Image (spheres, grey):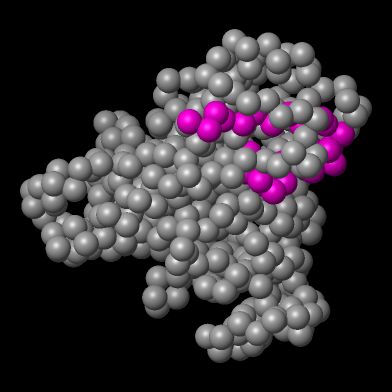
């Protein structure tokens, strides 16, 4: 297994215009160009030909802060030549749609990429991930990947699991998995799930898998190539709390000491090895079952940027862009910061755009633990009809009791279902 170490990330100092970073398939308003400019780097966007873009993918606009925008028209040699002309020395995916091309471009330029080209589904497809883990004996849900509803129903008849989850095969399609107990429920949910998956990813494939019980965690990691191969580091563990209706209510950053953190870290190290991760930031969504322990739900390259994300990274000092630029420093765990900041991400679900009314927004922003209020945490993603948006509030403080007080106050203020309707 690859070595597990602790890291801190510190922005490096660059000379403006000295080098450029390529952002592959960025979404409009994703923030990658601004983040790179803040670090003194030029940003070059590589967009995809219209024939391969999913319907819901919105490319960067001409007026965004990119030095150049290159359309990749399936001629990899031409794209590589143009990137070399801009002095590109770092490559990152700007959306899940850009992961495969980012890995190919990085490989051709001799730069670190998230994995070896040709194995990209292991880092962006739930079905491929479950099968790879099963073959290696690493805990994963029983899963079928298919685009055929008849095949899914036949597999459900054979598997006989009490409750299934139906979701997209491709990661980061922003819809909730549908829980299904019968053949009829699977068939009823199939068409809408498949349509949403295609609009977001360009792939009709879905996964039908057993419903995994246990609390959910998001485990953030960073991998870099060392003398003995890929070195994996867990950089953050987030414990998720859900509402009775199954919606995400909050995520709390856990300390990385203790048995739970150790078990999650060791398990994620095995997952990253199995999925062929060789460089960069990866987030794993894991359920912890009483009998099996950690079970992977999905793993994906970190491509998303929102104001809430950036507020968290500012507190923790671990922005994925710094990892892509190579400005990561390895240290011993005891030297990571003398002050401990507790961080919580609070989600306010809405069907009306997610933004609090002005008076409420001012009240919330004035709370002592509020570091950020993000009324558009989708980071450039458009919504499909009926999709919920979440206003996200980041709370941080040295005292966990202060976060709990403000959290309870926020929930009291937003208890009315129509809290976001007035403008």
Compared to residue 270, the image places residue 360 above or below, namely below
Compared to residue 47, the image places residue 87 above or below, namely above
**Which is nearer the eye, 179 or 173?**
173
**In the image, 219: left or right of 10?**
left
**Total numbered labels placed on residues in the image:** 0
Picture quarter with the N terminus? top left
**In the image, 415: left or right of 143?**
right
* Place of residue 282 in the rendered image (x, y in percent of width and height, measured from the top left): 54, 40
**Which is nearer the eye, 303 or 381?**
381
Compared to residue 62, the image places residue 189 above or below, namely below
Q: Residue at x 36, y 62 (%)?
A: 214
Picture quarter with the C terminus? bottom right
Q: Is residue 43 magenta?
A: yes
Q: Residue at x 64, y 53 (%)?
A: 379
Residue 125 appears in the picture as rendered: yes
Q: Residue at x 13, y 59 (%)?
A: 183
* Place of residue 300 in the rendered image (x, y in percent of width and height, measured from the top left): 49, 41
Q: What is the residue that sits farthest to the right in this orientation?
A: 15
**Which is nearer the eye, 419 or 410?**
419
**Which is nearer the eye, 73 or 294?**
73
Q: Quadrant of residue 95?
A: top right
* Place of residue 283 in the rendered image (x, y in percent of width and height, measured from the top left): 53, 45
* Place of residue 75 in the rendered image (x, y in percent of width and height, measured from the top left): 55, 15
Region of the chain picked out in magenta, as a range: 26-51
Q: Quadrant of residue 17?
A: top right
**In the image, 217: left or right of 341?**
left
Q: Residue at x 63, y 12 (%)?
A: 78
Compared to residue 159, the image places residue 136 above or below, namely above
């Amino acid at each position: 297994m690859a070595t597990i170490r602790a890291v801190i990330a510190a922005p490096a100092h660059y000379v403006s215009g000295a080098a450029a970073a390529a952002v592959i398939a960025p979404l409009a308003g994703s923030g990658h160009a601004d983040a790179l400019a803040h670090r003194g780097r030029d940003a070059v966007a590589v967009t995809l030909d219209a024939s391969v873009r999913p319907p819901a993918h919105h490319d960067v606009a001409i007026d965004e802060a990119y030095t150049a925008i290159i359309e990749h028209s399936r001629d990899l040699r031409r794209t590589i030549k143009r990137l070399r002309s801009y002095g590109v020395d770092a490559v990152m995916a700007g959306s899940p749609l850009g992961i495969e091309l980012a890995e190919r471009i990085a490989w051709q330029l001799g730069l670190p990429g998230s994995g070896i080209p040709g194995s990209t589904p292991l880092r962006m497809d739930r079905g491929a991930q479950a099968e790879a883990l099963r073959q290696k004996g690493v805990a994963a849900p029983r899963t079928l990947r298919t685009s055929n509803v008849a095949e899914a129903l036949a597999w459900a008849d054979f598997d006989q699991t009490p409750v299934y989850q139906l979701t997209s095969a491709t990661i980061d399609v922003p819809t909730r998995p549908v829980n299904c107990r019968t053949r009829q429920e699977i068939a009823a949910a199939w068409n809408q799930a498949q349509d949403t998956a295609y609009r977001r990813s360009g792939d009709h494939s879905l996964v039908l898998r057993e419903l995994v019980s246990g609390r959910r965690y998001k485990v953030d990691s960073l991998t870099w190539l060392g003398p003995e191969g890929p070195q994996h580091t867990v950089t953050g563990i987030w414990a998720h709390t859900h509402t009775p209706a199954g919606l995400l209510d909050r995520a709390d950053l856990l300390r990385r000491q203790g048995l739970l953190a150790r078990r999650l870290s060791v398990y994620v190290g095995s997952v990253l090895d199995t999925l062929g991760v060789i460089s960069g930031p990866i987030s794993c969504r894991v359920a912890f079952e009483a009998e099996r322990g950690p079970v992977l739900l999905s793993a994906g390259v970190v491509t998303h940027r929102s104001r809430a994300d950036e507020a968290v990274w500012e507190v923790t000092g671990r922005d994925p862009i710094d990892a892509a630029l190579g400005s990561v420093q390895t240290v011993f765990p005891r030297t990571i910061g003398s002050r401990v900041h507790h961080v919580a991400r609070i989600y306010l679900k809405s069907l009306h755009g997610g933004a609090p009314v002005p008076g409420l927004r001012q009240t919330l922003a004035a709370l002592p633990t509020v570091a950020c209020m993000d009324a558009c945490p989708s980071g450039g993603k458009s919504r499909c009809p009926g999709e919920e948006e979440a206003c996200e509030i980041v709370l941080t403080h040295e005292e966990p009791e202060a976060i709990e007080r403000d959290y309870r106050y926020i929930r009291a203020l937003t208890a009315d279902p129509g809290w976001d309707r007035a403008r």
